Image (cartoon, rainbow, N blue to C red):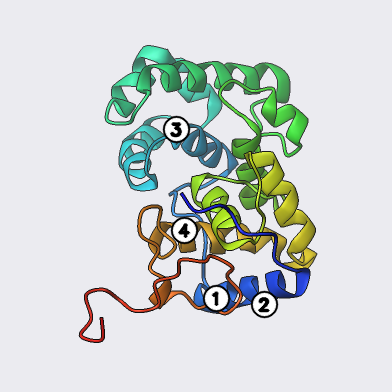
Amino acid sequence: MTDAPKPMSKAAAKAFITALANEYPNAESELVFRNPFELLVSVVLSAQATDKSVNKATKDMFERAPDPQSMAELGEAGIAQYIKTIGLWRAKAHNVALLCEQLLARHDGQVPSDRKSLEALAGVGRKTASVVMNVAFGSDAMAVDTHIFRIGNRTGLAPGKNVRQVEDGLVARIPKDMLRPSHHWLILHGRYVCKARTPECWRCPATKWCLYPDKRLVDPKSKAA
């Protein structure tokens, strides 16, 4: 595996992020939700699962239980019936049922907007809390998933041995006014272009600033290759 490059400069990071902003002007979460509660549940369910699989499972579940009270009434067994197609569904059903009870007991059924309260809920870690804070409440929180962790290290945007180091690097280098939407730009870029096994550098708008030493600038399927 190629070692991660040194961190790019703040000027390069701004140019890199600006290129992604121009590439994905309408970027938003690919999870389907109607309110902070549905977003919270969806993000909890999305661990080690695709957004597409989560959306498929939650469509009927949210029609049946659109709020913490009705979800809590479904209970762990009832929730499980809707999400069996998702990985780790047993643990997730347990966590969703418990977090609904916690929302009712601690927050009058409302999703809190602060990190401490969110991370105190069942199944909610730093990444999940950051997504909810960013998407539902407009916070500048940077949620680092596998895609963003990979991009941070591969490109030099924010190298780090763990997700917190990458998060801190992104917060330090990305201009504050671009921090919140950059979460979506980076996820989409990692999902569709800067892929795990074979980054499609020939489609990347930010190759000029990327420090990845093994760029593939020509599509191997093209005549030019």
Q: Is residue 16 left or right of residue 205?
A: right
| Residue ID for mark 3 | 45
Q: Residue at x 56, y 72 (%)?
A: 20
Q: Amino acid at mark 1?
A: Ala
Q: Position of residue 13 (x, y in %)?
A: 69, 69
Q: Residue at x 49, y 51 (%)?
A: 147
| Residue ID for mark 4 | 190
Element type where label 2 sits in the image = helix
Whether the residues at callouts 1 and 2 have beta carbons within 8 Å, the answer is yes
Looking at the rendered image, the disc whose residue lies closer to the viewer, 3 or 1, is 1
Q: Earlier in the sequence, mark 1 or mark 2?
A: 2
Q: Residue at x 62, y 46 (%)?
A: 143
Q: Earlier in the sequence, mark 3 or mark 1?
A: 3
| Residue ID for mark 2 | 15
Disc 3 crowd, CA 10 A, few/some/many (<14, 14-19, 20+) = many
Whole-angstrom CA distance, mark 1 to mark 2, is 8 Å
User: Along the line of sight, which residue is nearer the eye, 7 or 39?
Assistant: 7
Q: Is residue 156 left or right of residue 222?
A: right
